[in-house]
Image (cartoon, rainbow, N blue to C red):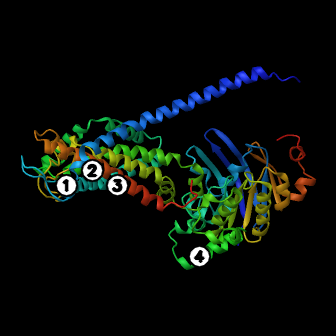
Amino acid sequence: MKTRVPENRARNMVRTAADHLATGLAILATVLVVMPLVAIFFYLIYKGASSLNLAFFTQIPKPEGEVGGGMANAIVGSGVLLGVASLLGIPVGIGAGIFLAEFGRGTRLANAIRFTADVLNGVPSIVMGIAAYSLVVVPMHHYSAFAGGVALSIMMIPTVTRTTEEMLLMVPHSVREAALGLGVPNWRSVLSITLRTASPGVITGCMLAFARVAGETAPLLFTALGNQFWSVSLNREIAALPLQIYIYAISPYDDQHRLAWAGALVLIVLIVLAVSLVRYVASRGILKGAS
Amino acid sequence: MGVGIEVTNLNAWYGANHTLQDINLPIPANHATALIGPSGCGKSTFVRCLNRMHETNPIAKVTGSVRIGEIDIYADASPVEVRRRVGMVFQRPNPFPTMSIYDNVASGLKLNGYSNRRSLDEIVERSLKHAALWDEVKDDLKKKSGASLSGGQQQRMCIARALAVDPEVLLMDEPASALDPVSTSKIEDLIFQLKSQYTIVIVTHNMQQAARVAEKTGFFLNGRMVEFDSTHKIFTNPSDKRTEDYITGRFG
């Protein structure tokens, strides 16, 4: 049999070129995705790092017009708000996700809940603030950290619910059968086997929701309100990093502008740290070699 | 110890599909019984009816009676109780991927609220020895994930997991079909040893396997049981023409 070398060589060259082209486009796309993040991060460092000092982390804001001061109360306040939001939003979200994937699959109720969650995901954050205002602030007659936490938790629920559902559905049917075949009751199998198998994905979903609401300003405007003084009480208005950044960014003073940049930098770093910490702790619970 | 199984007028459906029709079958205690037949003949559905796994599919339905020992599993017991007495090994190894080898084997007990550590250790060791896996895994029981073992080891771990809850009956749905020949022969040796203590029902596509491990063999075709007899008789002198055609490779 005669081989037709020249023709094959030409075809190979086309293939190699197409391969390089596809690889190049994929790399280009990756760079385009990462570039905004890197650009924002370096710009924040450029603008904000010079204002970072011990006072920033230990002092509360100075009165209008005075130079210096820090955002200690806002950092702690954000922590309190996010803690409340996570405690309320994550259990509800995971519970709803379990219902959608395990117990209500195919039912009208499940379809209604899934649709609601998707709509809720698209509701503007300022509307969440108004909702929490009328649900919590009005009955309590005053602004509070609790109201802010509720507003943020409502924003977390749809993300947590939908990722939990998706991750549970990815657990192979054979794993559920293994549990049922051992005489494990269905509810126990769902909690101890299916949810546990899906836990890395569920945790990622929770962290996505957490990171998303950590930077929210609008839902806090008329719930947590903000506070220029120390407060960790759930029953009183509380400071938050995004709120403090907002207040400083629209102020007329250069020093406060610099503090706003520093606040933004701290906010991003804290979010990255919190997410990394949770992932690290969670990954230690999973054995090596697990798929 | 194993107990015998008495199946009477068993019918099963998936939706409108009548997958099992009027099955009557006595399965002897402390023996291995093989079920053979072409794909889709209902043998897997049949074993899934013996531990009420069939009904976990929402469109499935079943009628008739299955007595395991003294208990009619469809009248006298809940599915959860039945499955604790009737262990199952599936076609593909299905370890719990996030659990260590130890936790995989102990899972049936732990998830049913059993938590005595000392006796758990003993049960895990005994079950792994029974499944001929102990020597290969004893050094990293709690360090390694069950999913990190090879396919054949995973399947033996799944057998150990089923044995750990001390069932009376062990159902095996093509336990070696996803395994290489060496692993397959290990599983077969295992069945040979286990059948003195458990009643074993094994579904297989491999007729040599049925001949090697089982005293009794049933031949299924199109949802009916065509013939049930001693394995020797089925393979040397079947009474039904269809059985003969199948085992001589004329169809299926």
Of residues A50 and A217, the one nearer the viewer is A50
Q: As shown in the figure, which amino acid type bears the numbered disc 3?
A: Ala
Judge the density around disc 4: few (<14), some (14-19), many (≥20) Cα neighbours within 10 Å: few
User: For residue A274, which numbered disc appears in the image?
Assistant: 3
Q: Is residue B83 left or right of residue A161?
A: right
| Residue receiving disc 1 | A56
Q: Subunit of mark 1? A: A
Q: CA distance from mark 1 to mark 3?
A: 19 Å
Q: As shown in the figure, which amino acid type bears the numbered disc 4?
A: Asp
User: Element type at marker 4?
Assistant: helix
Please indicate, yes or no, whether residue A289 appears anywhere in the rendered image: yes
User: Element type at marker 1?
Assistant: helix
Of residues B110 and B37, the one nearer the viewer is B110
Q: Is residue A9 left or right of residue A232?
A: right
Q: Are marks 1 and 2 in contact (CB under 8 Å)?
A: yes
Q: Subunit of mark 4? A: B
Please indicate, yes or no, whether residue B78 appears anywhere in the rendered image: no
**Residue ID at (64%, 71%):** B139
